[in-house]
Image: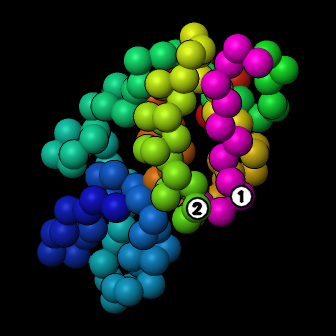
């Protein structure tokens, strides 16, 4: 999580494992916390995390064996540990594309905001419907 701290305001420039709720819970009520897009934080460029192969986000498992597939674990902590390793590993496989399988309910969970932020930057096609 990358933040900017101002007098009575915290700006979350890049979500991560420390959530907005975590930050709000650690601060006095008079301090507000919001998300902001900013190139100030590392990794903010649109294609910063994009592998060389096209990446598709989806919620169903593809049948095609010629597609490199990562089924994202149910735990955001585990997904965060695996994310970059899996992206590099799948990019090296002898296939033409990468499909990343996510559960639909992840979209609505604060704890997944950082992971989804990285995957959204890496994607070429979105069958997951962000």
Total numbered labels:
2
- When the figure is inspected, residue 96 is found, relative to residue 3, above or below; the finding is above
| Residue 6 figure quarter | bottom left
- When the figure is inspected, residue 25 is found, relative to residue 93, above or below; the finding is below
Spot the residue most to the top. Answer: 96
SS class, disc 1? loop
Estimate the x, y position of residue 80 in percent, counting from the top left. 50, 56
- When the figure is inspected, residue 113 is found, relative to residue 26, above or below; the finding is above
39 left or right of 117 in image: left
**In terms of depth relative to the viewer, which is nearer, 60 or 71?**
71
**Which residue is under mark 2?**
78
* Marks 2,1: beta carbons within 8 A: yes
Quadrant location of the C terminus in the rendered image: top right
Q: Which residue is painted at 47% across and 53% down in the image? A: 114
SS class, disc 2? helix
Quadrant location of the N terminus in the rendered image: bottom left
Residue density around tag 1, few if under 14, some if 14–19, many if 20 or more, within 10 Å:
few
Q: Which mark is residue 74?
A: 1
Determine the CA span between mark 2 and mark 1. Answer: 8 Å
């Amino acid at each position: 999580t990358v933040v900017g701290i101002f007098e009575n305001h915290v700006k979350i420039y890049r979500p991560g494992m420390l959530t907005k709720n975590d930050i709000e819970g650690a601060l006095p009520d008079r301090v507000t916390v919001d998300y902001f897009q900013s190139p100030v934080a590392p990794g903010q460029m649109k294609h910063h995390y994009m592998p060389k192969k096209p990446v598709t986000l989806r919620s169903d498992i593809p049948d095609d064996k010629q597609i490199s597939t990562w089924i994202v674990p149910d735990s955001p902590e585990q997904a965060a540990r695996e994310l970059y390793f899996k992206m590099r590993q799948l990019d090296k496989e002898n296939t033409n594309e990468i499909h990343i399988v996510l559960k639909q309910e992840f979209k609505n969970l604060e704890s997944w905001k950082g992971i989804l932020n990285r995957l959204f930057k890496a994607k070429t096609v979105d069958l997951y419907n962000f």
